[in-house]
């Protein structure tokens, strides 16, 4: 599509990619201080991080993931760190431990993880971290939300073709 209509579609997509929503089937985990869940595009779950969430916020984040794993349905995760600050070293350790403890279930149910991180130096640093390399299943680092959404759509198309 070109011209004015094409430009309007791009602007609409960009607005969609950058607005937080809190609706859907996981009503009890829609909003946690510093972490917002968008689940209206089920099975795509978009977690938006704001600043450095408190440890209790991460507790709720992990509890929500455990409920999703217990439900047994496949899902694809987009972690939007566009407005996030670096987690604390303790939070990074805990994340690596949580992923390791749930690796089998994540391999079985996760269709993939896209991390939206606009900073190229931070993306490069993350590629060197063991925690990111150990994510079970397909995963990708994206410079913006549109790239993550395209990757997610491709993953869903691959799944539906199989």
Image: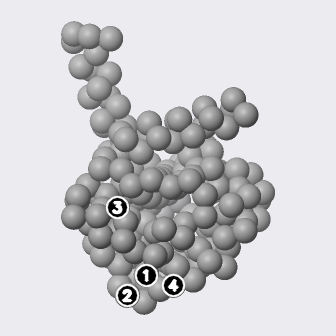
Circle on res. 92: 1
* Residue beneath the point at 70% across and 50% down: 74
Secondary structure beneath dot 1 equals: helix
Q: State yes or no: discs 4 and 1 in contact (Cβ < 8 Å).
A: yes
- N-term mark: 2 or 4: 2
The image quadrant that residue 82 belongs to is bottom left
Q: Is residue 37 above or below residue 130?
A: above
Q: Earlier in the sequence, mark 1 or mark 3?
A: 3
Indicate the secondary structure of the residue bearing disc 2: helix
Confirm or deny contact between disc 2 and disc 3 (CB under 8 A).
Answer: no
In the image, which disc is placed on residue 94?
Answer: 4
Q: Which is more toward the observer, 140 or 150?
A: 140
* 3D distance between C-alphas at marks 4 and 1: 5 Å
Instruction: Tell me where residue 15 appears, x and y as whole percent.
Output: 31, 37
Q: Which residue corresponds to the image point at 50% horizontal and 55% vertical from the top-left?
A: 139
Q: Is residue 115 visible?
A: yes
Q: Position of residue 89 (x, y in %)?
A: 37, 87
Kindly indicate whether the residue at mark 1 contacts the one at mark 2 (C-beta within 8 angstroms). yes
Query: Residue beneath label 3, please?
Result: 81
Q: Earlier in the sequence, mark 3 or mark 4?
A: 3
Looking at marks 2 and 3 on the same chain, the residue that comes earlier in the sequence is marked by 3
Badge 3 vs badge 4, beta-carbon distance below 8 Å: no
Pointer 1 local density, CA inside 10 Å: few below 14, some 14–19, many at least 20: few
Residue 136, image x, y percentages: 60, 64
* Mark 2 → mark 1, Cα distance in angstroms: 5 Å
Reading the image, the residue beneath label 2 is 89
The answer to whether any part of residue 68 appears in the image is no
């Amino acid at each position: 599509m070109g011209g004015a209509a094409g430009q309007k579609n791009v602007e609409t997509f960009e607005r969609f990619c950058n607005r937080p929503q809190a609706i859907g089937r996981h009503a009890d985990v829609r909003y946690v201080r510093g972490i917002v869940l968008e689940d209206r595009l089920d099975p795509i779950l978009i977690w938006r991080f704001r600043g450095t969430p408190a440890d209790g916020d991460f507790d709720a984040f992990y509890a929500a993931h455990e409920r999703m794993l217990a439900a047994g349905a496949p899902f694809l995760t987009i972690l939007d760190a566009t407005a996030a600050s670096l987690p604390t070293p303790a939070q990074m350790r805990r994340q690596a431990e949580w992923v390791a403890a749930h690796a089998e279930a994540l391999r079985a149910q996760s269709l993939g993880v896209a991390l939206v991180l606009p900073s190229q130096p931070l993306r490069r640093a993350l590629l060197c971290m063991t925690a990111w390399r150990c994510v079970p299943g397909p995963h990708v680092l994206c410079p913006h939300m549109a790239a993550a959404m395209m990757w997610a759509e491709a993953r869903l198309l691959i799944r539906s073709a199989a």
